[in-house]
Amino acid sequence: MSSLSSLQINKPLDGLGRTPLMSACGRGADRRIIDILIKAGAELGAKDVGGWTALHLAVLGRRLQAVELLLSRGSNVNEKAMFGNTPLHLAASSSPEWTDGMKAIMKQSAVEVNPQNIDGRTPLHFACWWGSLHTVDLLLGHNGIEANVVANNGDTPLHVAVRRQRYDTVSKMLIQDSVNLEIVNKEYRTPLLEAVSDGHLGIMQRLIARGANVNVVEHGGNNCLHLALKRENNFHSEVEHMTMLDQVSFHIVCDYVCV
């Protein structure tokens, strides 16, 4: 151990400011090596120039053994890097999905499942962006999850899933009773207005079936029917465009006549 101490165990190895522990965790070194470094005094909370800790780098590298070992040794599961991303943000945005890493992080009693980065986005925003169904499911299944967190641009995770045209993710979100369909983002759009504007018939149908308000009006004074008429080129076919117009018109009329 004394020989390791003489090597200044926490001295950065490169211009990125990464210590031997950071390098070992990011590259997936044998857990015995990582353990030796920790026992020799490697600082778990040391950060490189980007604000990444060894845990962040282990998650970025999808190094499950390193993640589990660091967490068991007391690494801060909620530490934020330069742009405010926690290890859970990184795991949720991993592509392809990394459910083992998500589970390892989420089983920590101290984990915060709704942290917001500098853009106001949570891990659920990230999972919806990527359409990561299992990750979305894990997050929604946590007792502390808040499904309607609003990012700096006004988007909820549902807005993100709709804009990215993640049909299965939208369907998964809509199962949750707590999901609010009427939150308006900074473009004055609800998820339904986004779906109509983007020309996604299937998502529009799912949102309306769940009870989304078809009469909501965006900043420019347009409701769903106006947007459907204006965005003809966004649809995959004339038939799909006409189907959306028919369905939106029907529900608007029903709101006035069928009450």
Image (tube, rainbow, N blue to C red):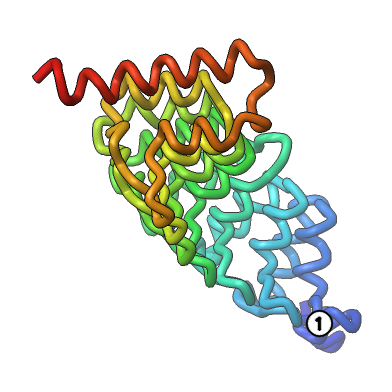
Q: Residue sitting at 74 percent across and 65 percent down?
A: 36
Percent position (x, y) of residue 41?
67, 78
Judged from the image, the secondary structure of the residue bearing numbered disc 1 is: loop
In which quarter of the view is residue 223 placed? Answer: top left
The residue lying furthest to the right in this view is 14
Counting from the top left corner in percent of width and height, residue 97 is at: 66, 35
Relative image position of residue 214 (x, y in whole percent): 31, 32
For the residue pair 219 and 140, the one nearer the viewer reads as 219
Q: In the depicted view, which residue is nearer to us: 231 or 154? A: 231
Q: Quadrant of residue 179?
A: top left
- 249, 7: nearer the viewer: 249
Residue 99 in view here = no
Residue farthest to the left, as pictured: 259
Residue 14 location, quadrant: bottom right
Q: Is residue 148 visible?
A: yes
| Left or right of 130 on screen, residue 172 | left
Quarter of the image with the N terminus in it: bottom right
Q: Residue at x 35, y 52 (%)?
A: 184
Circle 1 Cα neighbour tier, 10 Å, few/some/many (<14 / 14–19 / ≥20): some
According to the picture, the residue beneath numbered tag 1 turns out to be 17
Badge count: 1
Q: Which of these two is toward me, 97 or 26?
A: 97
138 vs 121: above or below? above
The C terminus - image quarter = top left
Residue drawn at x 76%, y 59% is 25
